[in-house]
Amino acid sequence: MKIPSKYIENAVDQISSLPGIGKRTALRLVLQLMSRSKEEIEDFSNAFILMKEHVKKCSTCGNVSDIEVCIICSNIARDNTLICVVEDVRDVLAIEATESYNGVYHVLGGIISPMDGIGPNDLNIPSLIDRAQQGSVKEIIFALSATMEGDTTNFFLYRKLRAFEISISTLSRGVSVGAELQYADEITLSRSLINRQPFEV
C-alpha cells in the first residue's frame, strides 16, 4: 500500500505500532483524524502527553494513579488485610468490574516467563514481601492467569510468602486453564474470587 504523503505514512506507522492494529486499520484511523479540526487534534495528542507526564504507579500496590497512593489503597472502606495479586492494571479493572471484591491489590507488572526474558527480578515482588512482613495482612489471593507462566509465578510467590502467618489462596478454576484473566467474563471472575481455594503445591 503506497501512501502518497510521508506525513500520513509516518502517522500510520505510529498508530500501527499499537498492538492489534494493522496498517489498513491504522490508515482508516489516520484519515478519520485528518477530518478533525486542528484544535481537536491538539486535544487528542495532549491527552496522551498529559497521561505520560502525570500518571504514576501507586507507591503501595503498583496500580496506576494520578497521586502517590491510588484511590483503592487510600479508601478506608477497603479491607487492607486482604491482598489480591494480579499481573497488570487490566486485571485490577476486570476484578473491580465484578463488584464482588473489597480488598486491595498488588500489581506485579507481569509474570515470570523465561521465554520472554522475564524473571522474578523484573517484577514488583519485593514490595509484596514487605507488605506481608508488616503483620497486618491476613490473606493473599493469587489471581494470575491460569497459564504455565501464571502457575510458575504463583509457586515462586508461595515459596517467598509461606514463612509468614498468612492464608494464601488462589482463584477457583472457574477461570479456564490457559485463559488470560482479563478476558474472563464478570460472572465467572466473580465466582472464582468468592470460591477461591487454599493455594497448594
Image (cartoon, rainbow, N blue to C red):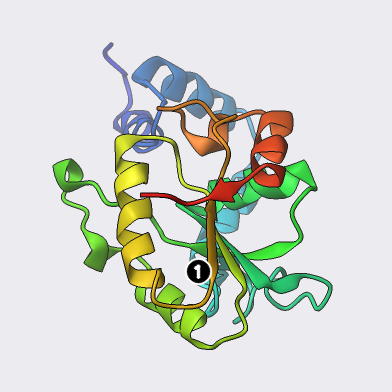
User: 33 or 61, which lies in front?
Assistant: 61
Number of dots carrying numbers: 1
Question: Residue 89 location in percent, x, y?
Answer: 54, 53
Asked whether residue 45 appears in the rendered view, the answer is no
- Residue 24 is drawn in which quadrant? top left
Question: Residue 55 location in percent, x, y?
Answer: 55, 68
Asked whether residue 143 appears in the rendered view, the answer is yes
Residue at 40% in and 70% down:
161
- Is the residue marked by circle 1 packed among few (<14), some (14-19), or many (20+) residues within 10 Å? many
Seen from this angle, which residue lies furthest bottom? 134
Residue at 59% in and 82% down:
68
Question: Which residue is denoted by mark 1 in the rendering?
Answer: 62
Note whether 119 is above or below 53 in the view shown.
Answer: above
Q: Secondary structure at mark 1?
A: loop
User: 80 or 163, which lies in front?
Assistant: 163
Residue at 19% in and 44% down:
116
User: 171 or 111, which lies in front?
Assistant: 171
What type is the residue that disc 1 sits on?
Gly
Question: Residue 96 location in percent, x, y?
Answer: 71, 50
Question: Residue 70 location in percent, x, y?
Answer: 65, 72
Residue at 33% in and 54% down:
155
* Left or right: where 128 falls relative to 115: right
Note whether 182 is above or below 163 in the view shown.
Answer: above
Seen from this angle, which residue lies furthest top? 1
Note whether 189 is above or below 170 in the view shown.
Answer: above
| Quadrant of the image containing the N terminus | top left
- Residue 128 is drawn in which quadrant? bottom left
* Left or right: where 193 falls relative to 176: right
